[in-house]
Image: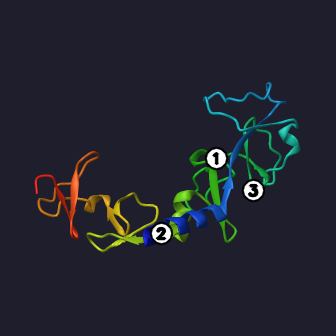
Amino acid sequence: MTSGDKMDATVGDLMRAHAAVVTRVTSKDHEGGQQIDPNGETVDEVLNVHPSFLECSGCSESIRDRYFLRAMDRYWHEDCLTCELCQCRLGEVDCYMYTKMGRKLCKRDYLRLFAPSGVCSACNRSIPAYEMVMTVAPGRVFHLECFKCSQCEKHFCVGDKYYLMGANIVCEDH
């Protein structure tokens, strides 16, 4: 296992330790408890109890909505389960939310706050854990804007061939 693999394993372990599944829920008491909502999105769970008997963990009000969420073994209005930093609705972003230090977070904010960052092999600037990168070899990671030929500075596109020449990346023409 290389140091790059160790970093990936560490980030994955970190995320799994703080991940909670977010499921969309409906009730059989609401027009038959359909498995697909009007927007074509699937519903993960159908309850046999009317949602008004459930209390939202966010606002402590009774749940009267046709569709709602379950996360961390609690029920939520779709508007009440939000990332505490960016306020995005966690039921819309992903099927996972992340909790750490008592905070509910989306994946992007969780990674921004708690995942280790890397360093770009071209510019030596920090690469935040949530940023898209190009990895060419273990320990050789680049910002997308830094992933270019060291001779002509042509940016590579998907499918372009490149070669590693020592510490440099060069295009087919060089």
Left or right of 77, for residue 164: left
Instruction: Name the kind of residue labelled 3 in the image.
Output: Met
Q: Earlier in the sequence, mark 3 or mark 1?
A: 3
Q: Residue at x 65, y 64 (%)?
A: 18
Relative to 98, does residue 27 appear above or below in the rendering? above
Left or right of 53, for residue 88: left
Instruction: Name the kind of residue labelled 2 in the image.
Output: Met
| Residue occupied by mark 3 | 72
Q: Earlier in the sequence, mark 1 or mark 2?
A: 2
Left or right of 19, for residue 165: left
Q: Residue at x 60, y 63 (%)?
A: 15
| Residue occupied by mark 2 | 1
Distance (Cα) linking label 1 and label 2:
36 Å
| Residue occupied by mark 1 | 91
- The answer to whether residue 104 is seen in the rendering is no
Colour scheme of this structure image? rainbow
- Density class for disc 2 (Cα within 10 Å; few <14, some 14-19, many ≥20) is few
Distance (Cα) linking label 2 and label 3:
34 Å
- The answer to whether residue 89 is seen in the rendering is yes
